[in-house]
Amino acid sequence: MLDAAADRLGVSRRLLILIEAGEANPSLSSLLAIAAGFGVPLFDLLADTGTPMITVQADNSTARALWRGPAGGEGRLLVASGGLELWDWTLQPGEERRSDAHRTGSREALTVTAGSVTIEVTGAEPVVLKRGQSAAFAADFDHHYANGGQRPARFLLAVHESS
């Protein structure tokens, strides 16, 4: 049964065992694969069942980093509710974050707070956003963010996973 679950979720049997035992530190890609396999948003997978109506991240710098780049960039999930997530991303020069398509109807919106970020969505021309610019797009296509600049880039990202 565990082998079938691992195959369905697209992760290894060992990883599932370690997660269940509380001994794993799964990658963001693995967590997204598991959430997609169960048909739930990432936040629902990570949520405490006693979550209050208002979720507060008292200090964004202490939010859990669920992605770390090879040059020190990171993606922190600040808050989430249902299918809505708010992330704080930093990409160091030369770093990129690739994402598989989310569920049909999913959307992402971001605003760049430092540097510049290139967004590429399958089937669309790449777009470069500079500090102070924002964009929204259909996230049910493969997409990625990249920092082709010489300075760190930072952006806030809202993800809405459709049900």
Image (cartoon, helix red, strand yellow):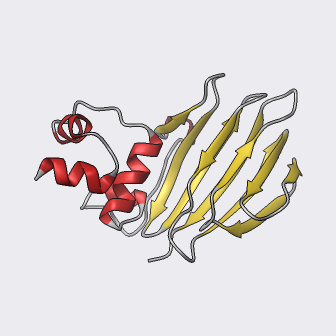
Tell whether 130 sits left or right of 4. Answer: right
**Quarter location, residue 70:** top right
Residue 77: image x %, image y %? 51, 48
Q: Is residue 156 above or below residue 109?
A: above
**Which residue is located at x 73 percent, y 29 percent?**
92
Looking at the picture, tell me which residue is in the foreground, 89 or 9.
9
Tell whether 103 sits left or right of 113. Answer: left
Looking at the picture, tell me which residue is in the foreground, 27 or 56.
27
Count of marks, rendered view: 0
**Which residue is located at x 26 percent, y 36 percent?**
15
Q: Is residue 48 above or below residue 16?
A: below
**Which residue is located at x 74 percent, y 67 percent?**
136
Residue 21: image x %, image y %? 15, 36
**Quarter location, residue 120:** bottom right
Q: Is residue 156 visible?
A: yes
Looking at the picture, tell me which residue is in the foreground, 112 or 121.
121
Residue 135: image x %, image y %? 79, 63
Residue 37: image x %, image y %? 33, 60
